[in-house]
Amino acid sequence: MNQNEQLEEMRQLEATLQNLLVKKQNLQSQLKEINDAIKSLDSSKEAYKIIGNIMVKKDKKSLTEESRSKKESIELKIKNIEKHQESLNSRMKKLQEKIIKNIKKTQ
């Protein structure tokens, strides 16, 4: 792999990392909303769910369970993204070391 190919791979890794960061931020925002909803459900007597443009009364227990399930799913997605980020960061570090080594060889 020549230096231009290595630099292109580095750019692609950076773009992928940027996309993962955006996805992670969106999931963290959703997680905050769900945590807020769970807190509200814990302190309320009645529960409502927004479906489309309408608000429907729903069983508090089932809505809480549904919210907790969504929370777990989002937390798992965030963990997977973090693992992917770690893997890409490791690949980038190795690639940077290769590039620097190649640059030193040509000097």
Image (tube, grey):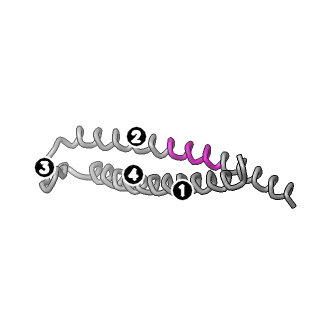
Q: Which residue is mark 4?
A: 31
Magenta span? 80-89
Mark 2 — residue?
72
| Amino acid type at image mark 3 | Val
- Identify which amino acid the numbered label 1 is placed on: Ala
The disc labelled 4 sits on which kind of residue? Leu
Residue 52 vertical placement versus 60 (above, below) = below
Instruction: Please name the residue that numbered disc 3 is placed on.
Output: 56
- Residue flagged by tag 2: what amino acid is it? Glu
The Cα atoms of the two marked residues, 4 and 3, are separated by 22 Å
Which residue is label 1 attached to? 15
Residue drawn at the location 45% of the way across and 40% of the way down: 76
Front residue of 60/96: it is 96
x and y percentages locating residue 5 in the rendered image: 66, 51
At mark 3, the secondary structure is: strand
Regarding mark 2 in the picture, which secondary structure is present there?
helix
Which of the two marks, 1 or 4, is nearer to us in this view?
1
Q: Which of the marked residues, 2 or 3, is nearer the chain's N terminus? A: 3
Which badge, 2 or 4, is on the more N-terminal residue?
4
The 10 Å Cα crowd at callout 1, few under 14, some 14 to 19, many 20 or more, is: few
